[in-house]
Amino acid sequence: MHGKKRSETMVEGMQHLLALTAHARRLARAGDYKSLERLIRQREEVLAQLGSRGCRPSNDVQAKLIKEIVLCIEQLDKEIVYFVRDQMKQHSRDMLEITTKLRVLSAYSKGLSGNRRFDRVL
């Protein structure tokens, strides 16, 4: 009975990990990285607890369920990485655009220094 209780706890722990990962995906998609960072710490705690238990599924049904949960978590993790990388690419493009605007502004400012007036050039 004690072994069965442990494996049920393992399944529940994996389900909790899946729920946390699904929530992490929503946060990543929304770009809420502060909340995502806190959630990742929670996930790490759950993983540490699962690893410290050292129990195995008591039957094939639980083993299959755990395997399916792990596959779902892996897929969600891939999606989270995709969303974060996509956001990083967008931020890189934004930074490049800002840098270009600063260069243009700097060049324009140099052209105006020395009290130059465009109407005198013409």
Image: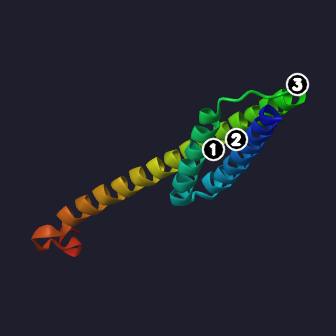
Above or below for 18 versus 120: above
Q: Residues within 10 Å of mark 2 (few under 14, many from 20)?
A: some
Per the image, the residue denoted by label 2 is 76
Q: Do the residues labelled 2 and 1 touch (CB within 8 Å)?
A: yes
Q: In which quarter of the image is residue 119?
A: bottom left
Marks 2/1: CA–CA distance: 6 Å
For the C terminus, give its image quadrant.
bottom left
Where residue 100 appears, as percent x and y from the top left, is 35, 53
Instruction: Say which of 39 and 12 sits in front.
Output: 12
Identify the element where label 2 is drawn.
helix
Is 73 situated left or right of 36 in this image?
right
Above or below for 10 versus 94: above
Q: Residues within 10 Å of mark 3 (few under 14, many from 20)?
A: few
| Residue at the farthest front position | 1
How many discs mark residues in the rendered view?
A: 3
Which amino acid does the dot numbered 3 rest on?
Answer: Asp
- Disc ID at residue 80: 1
For the N terminus, give its image quadrant.
top right
Image point 50% across, 47% down: which residue?
88
Per the image, the residue denoted by label 3 is 60
Image point 67% across, 50% down: which residue?
20
Any part of residue 109 in sight? yes
Is 75 situated left or right of 90 in this image?
right
